[in-house]
Amino acid sequence: MIAVDWGTSSLRVYRLDEAGRITDQRDLSIGLLACRGRFEAVLAELITGWDAEELIVMAGMVGSRNGWQEVPYATCPAGADEIAAGMVQLPAPGLPGRRIFIAPGLAWPGSADHHTPEVMRGEETQLLGLLDLLPGDGIHTVCLPGTHSKWATVQGGRITGFRTAMTGEVYAVLRQHSILGAQMTTPEPAASASAAADAGSNAAFDLGLATSRSTGGLLNHLFSVRARHLFGELPGAAESADYLSGLLIGHELQGLLAPDNSLTQQVHLIGSSTLMQRYQHALHSLGISAKVHTEGLVTRGLFALARRCGAG
Amino acid sequence: MIAVDWGTSSLRVYRLDEAGRITDQRDLSIGLLACRGRFEAVLAELITGWDAEELIVMAGMVGSRNGWQEVPYATCPAGADEIAAGMVQLPAPGLPGRRIFIAPGLAWPGSADHHTPEVMRGEETQLLGLLDLLPGDGIHTVCLPGTHSKWATVQGGRITGFRTAMTGEVYAVLRQHSILGAQMTTPEPAASASAAADAGSNAAFDLGLATSRSTGGLLNHLFSVRARHLFGELPGAAESADYLSGLLIGHELQGLLAPDNSLTQQVHLIGSSTLMQRYQHALHSLGISAKVHTEGLVTRGLFALARRCGAG
């Protein structure tokens, strides 16, 4: 089969053997917006030569309103069976001899005391991939840090609910467009490179984490990026950026671990960026252990879905 | 005397009689950045013809590092006496026959349990103006909503401490530069105009306020702007913007009223924009009364400072 992870800004295709192992992979930094309307042609070109595979399973924003075809969300609680049941087969005359499916994203209407809807498209394949690896009993907490971090609760082989935090996007937007950005522009690029290498272990990040636990709330704490700089507590661009990162990650954890903070002893982190070190460090500072999962979850999840549409 | 309120984006001058009443006023939308280095000339031109007044007292970002001359912050607790003691007289050969002072901003190192520094430049004159009107006994809570909202505690004629919330700036930056902005662009400008007229009373704003009180934290709640839109709960641009406004103001109140929320029965709001209605409504929904003060506080505060440098 061919597994396709097609998001807003990138397209990745994987050729999998009958055991679900990756035998080849290709990618393009052509997301949905860049190839609008030409989905079939872009995909056909990228998988040229992979002729033996009949089945193609896609996930991600390709199934959104602005994608190839909108596929309605599956609803939590959902495991591989429920998500597979929501897959939609596409007519694709430009791809003869293939059967093409788009997996649904996942929605959650919220808990009884917090009735706010949640959605994801793409992350559910990684969660499905992880489900395969976790013991079936117990309640597991999973976090996928990023532009829009996802926090999911997993129980009995199904995703029972999840929450999103716009941590990465808020960080980028404040850094690029707010008054706080001015103190984060560094004349020498080397400074931020060394800061990245040092990720998760520096004092400014820790000060941000500690401040996130004080009173005042995030909107107040954000101003402290500026005030601490004025008083020399965050002298350089890297310190200011690390402090902001600590503040935001600290608030994300506080908001999304609560009210079960005391119940959560381990968080499964999914991802491969240096950000994982920061989340791991932040979790440790709350007395919570973190296990990082990096490789192969997307294809594992898409393979699990493919097995369920084998009969076509 | 002449009272001068000189901020980052605007310059206002007031001619006051001996009782502190405004007899004339002028303004320019020339802030600090626009007239860099030409402070004296810009001011001289704007007060042309006001020749009888010898004393000029200025406040605002004009006393910051990027202003005419940096004036060190006065420190809380501070009333008119302490702030006046920190004023700096400027040499101004281009303004013969005048005595020119810049008032210091105000700093607060934070409380014992939340040692985060705070600063303001300009708002302290409005607070001084209000001090004149408040009874000397009791503890008063004052809020100046805006780009960077200021929350001050006032006791015994002095400002004992304050906090900043970047509510207005975060609102603007998210609206203009984040993924949330797309659903807030309206083809017909009429929609947002009517939303402004309706400020503080609409259902979307109230839904934002209510959501701000649920679990998850601000970074999570921000994503609900998008998720609710996807599910048709925030169909139009105005609803999305009002909901975001409710979320942010709700979080500001939660963060800065706490932990004394139960002790605060009244908040003094300073300002004249339609934003005041929103804050008033949000405070009412928490069972807190709000008294809005709009006129003349800046000149009242600057006049109080002027009286204290009468001897030169």
Image (tube, coloured by chain):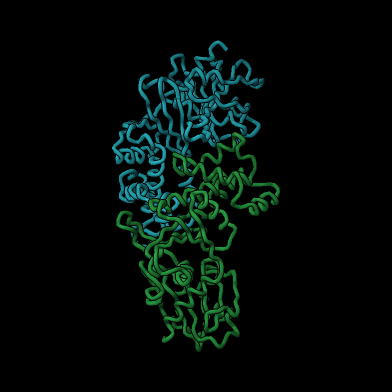
Chain colours: A green, B cyan
Q: Quadrant of the C terminus of chain A?
A: bottom left
Name the quadrant containing residue B281.
top left
Residue A150 image point, x, y percent: 46, 60
Query: How many numbered discs sit on the rendered protein?
Result: 0
Task: Residue B290: tell me if it is visible.
Answer: no
Image: A165 above or below B4: below
User: Is A105 left, or right, of B44 in this rendering?
Assistant: left
| Residue A77 sits in quarter | bottom left
Q: Position of residue B87 (x, y in %)?
A: 57, 20
Q: Is residue A195 visible?
A: yes
Please name whichever residue, B131 or A253, is drawn nearer the observer in this view of the structure.
Answer: A253
Residue lying at 57% horizontally and 63% vertically, measured from the top left = A272
**x 57%, y 12%: residue:** B312
Task: Residue lying at the far top in this picture: please name it.
Answer: B311
- In the foreground, B143 or A38: B143
Residue A66 position in % (x across, y down): 46, 68
Vertical order, A223 against A263 (above or below):
above
Q: Is residue B307 left or right of residue A86?
A: right
Q: Identify which residue, A15 or A294, lies in the foreground.
A: A294
Residue B210 at x, y = what percent?
33, 48
As drawn, is A50 to the left or to the right of A306? right
Residue at 65% x, 50% y: name it. Answer: A195
Q: Toward the viewer: B275 or A82?
A: A82
B209 relative to B298, above or below: below
